[in-house]
């Protein structure tokens, strides 16, 4: 038979507490908590290291019971009421008995234990499996916002209709005048919830995924941020503008600057930015990937120059070989001259986007075109995919170079159709309109057959071979 009780744990003596010595020689601490009207007391105990602490009972009850293996277990009930704690204990004993009798498996018992645990602990555990990057932080923020919006406290509270109704509501303009949430943002929330529950199922914390097979909003129909690609002329102007960008003016130390140290060296000069733009547009690298490229990753002297990206540097976690054009390899060779193998190829600062916009302005290239499409650093990856398509590179090859899992992403998102020679593609087709009909209607009587002027006619002016009109393609019926 199990029991419920409150644990007595040592805690530091509260600040401002009064120590009272009792007649038997023991000591008691007396203090009034913030917001309380009556003071509290607790016996004082001296630890082995000489510290004075108080013995205080926990606010929640603990349950002691025998599990399915007959071992004594202790679990927190999370209840401050004794009657509620005893009901929690009864449920634990009932589940242990069901396992012993074979009604419930141990895997189902483990799932039942996790279902009752607070959901925030599961979110923290899942985010820890994603690492410490931006994706992990964004996923955790998505899940915590959903849990707060729906009042999810445990895994048992996960409901599919909650998420579906919320996504539908977010697709409409808000009452406070704010625009509706974009389809990409809604897909981000849904993807985080689905992946979270898939992980819970894999680690046997949840029996099934409540959000499985939910239809996703179509991002293509509601794209708020549409990038365009740079043409070849625009790309050359951008690189030239970066190369000719003015250097940072020297810092002249004044009388009030005596406490300052020397000005640090400039990060990512104009020449380095030009090489970086050429690399991003010539390989399709992401900025985060380019930031992790080391000098040792480059092979610039072989017959086929390229770079090797480790799994830690790529977005999908898979190592990849990136081929380089000869002129790009020559530019990178100048960039890494005198560097150590462990040095990064580019020292990319946090304000790269601001410098990119400055180079666009110097090159005379607008950030936004007449159709509302934008240019940013990631647009150089779109430029790479578009130039591959314009050069007639097969889609399978372009997908491999872009390192996409789905060719639709390569063809639809990272290909700017405005830079493709659509008219030239049509002109390259075999001609189908070169055959001109030699027979045309001449306004003859309805139901009569007419022929070209050189055909024989009878005395009434009708075609003498009308009987063969349906078999001769040179004739047709005028209706």
Image (cartoon, rainbow, N blue to C red):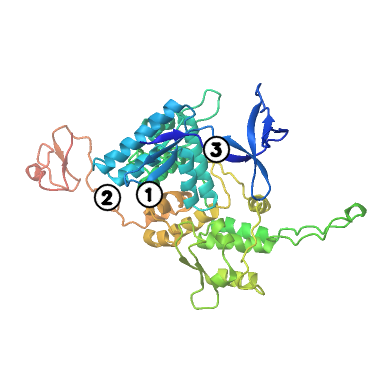
Q: Position of residue 88 (x, y in %)?
A: 39, 32
Q: Position of residue 388 (x, y in %)?
A: 45, 60
Instruction: Indicate which disc residue 436 carries.
Output: 2
- Between the residue at mark 1 and the residue at mark 3, the CA separation in whole angstroms equals 34 Å
Q: Residue at position x 51%, y 55% from top?
A: 381
Residue named by callout 3: 8
User: Residue pushed farthest bottom?
Assistant: 302
Observer-side mark, 2 or 3, equals 3
Observer-side mark, 2 or 1, equals 1
Query: Residue 341's quadrant in the figure?
Result: bottom right
Residue 159 visible in image? no
Task: Return the disc, 1 or 3, that comes first in the chain's sequence.
Answer: 3
Task: Return the disc, 2 or 3, that comes first in the chain's sequence.
Answer: 3
Q: Position of residue 132 (x, y in %)?
A: 54, 52
Q: In the picture shown, does residue 82 fall above or below 71?
A: above
Q: Residue at position x 31%, y 55% from top?
A: 431
């Amino acid at each position: 038979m199990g029991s419920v009780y409150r644990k007595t744990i040592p805690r530091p003596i509260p600040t401002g507490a009064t120590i009272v010595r009792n007649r038997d020689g023991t000591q008691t601490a007396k203090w009034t908590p913030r917001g309380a009207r009556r003071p509290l007391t607790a016996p004082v105990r001296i630890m082995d290291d000489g510290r004075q602490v108080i013995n205080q009972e926990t606010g929640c009850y603990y349950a002691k019971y025998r599990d399915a293996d007959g071992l004594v277990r202790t679990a927190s009930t999370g209840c401050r009421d004794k009657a509620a704690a005893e009901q929690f204990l009864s449920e634990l004993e009932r589940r242990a008995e069901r396992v012993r009798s074979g009604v419930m498996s141990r895997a189902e018992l483990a799932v039942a234990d996790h279902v009752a645990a607070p959901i925030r602990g599961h979110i923290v555990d899942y985010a820890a499996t994603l690492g410490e990057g931006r994706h992990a932080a964004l996923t955790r923020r998505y899940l915590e916002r959903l849990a707060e919006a729906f009042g999810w406290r445990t895994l048992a509270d996960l409901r599919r209709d909650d998420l579906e109704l919320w996504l539908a509501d977010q697709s409409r303009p808000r009452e406070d005048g704010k625009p509706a949430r974009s389809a990409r943002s809604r897909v981000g929330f849904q993807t985080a919830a689905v992946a979270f529950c898939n992980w819970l199922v894999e680690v046997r914390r949840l029996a099934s995924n409540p959000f499985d097979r939910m239809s996703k909003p179509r991002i293509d129909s509601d794209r708020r941020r549409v990038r365009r690609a740079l043409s070849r002329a625009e790309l050359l102007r951008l690189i030239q503008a970066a190369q000719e960008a003015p250097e940072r003016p020297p810092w002249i130390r004044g009388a009030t600057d005596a406490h300052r140290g020397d000005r640090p060296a400039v990060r990512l000069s104009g020449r380095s930015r030009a090489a970086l733009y050429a690399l991003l547009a010539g390989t399709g690298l992401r900025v985060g990937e380019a930031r992790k490229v080391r000098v040792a990753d480059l092979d610039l002297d072989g017959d086929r120059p390229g770079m090797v990206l480790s799994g830690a540097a790529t977005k999908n976690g898979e190592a990849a070989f990136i081929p380089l054009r000869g002129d790009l390899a020559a530019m990178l060779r100048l960039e890494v001259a005198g560097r150590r193998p462990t040095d990064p190829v580019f020292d990319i600062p946090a304000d790269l986007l601001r410098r990119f916009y400055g180079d666009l302005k110097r090159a005379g290239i607008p950030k936004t075109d007449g159709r509302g499409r934008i240019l940013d650093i990631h647009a150089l990856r779109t430029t790479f995919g578009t130039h591959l398509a314009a050069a007639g590179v097969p889609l399978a090859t372009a997908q491999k170079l872009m390192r996409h899992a789905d060719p639709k992403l390569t063809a639809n998102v990272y290909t700017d159709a405005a830079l493709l020679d659509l008219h030239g593609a049509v002109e390259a087709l075999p001609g189908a309109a070169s055959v001109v009909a030699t027979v045309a209607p001449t306004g003859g009587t309805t139901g009569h057959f007419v022929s070209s002027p050189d055909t024989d006619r009878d005395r009434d002016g009708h075609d003498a071979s009308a009987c063969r009109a349906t078999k001769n393609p040179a004739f047709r019926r005028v209706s």
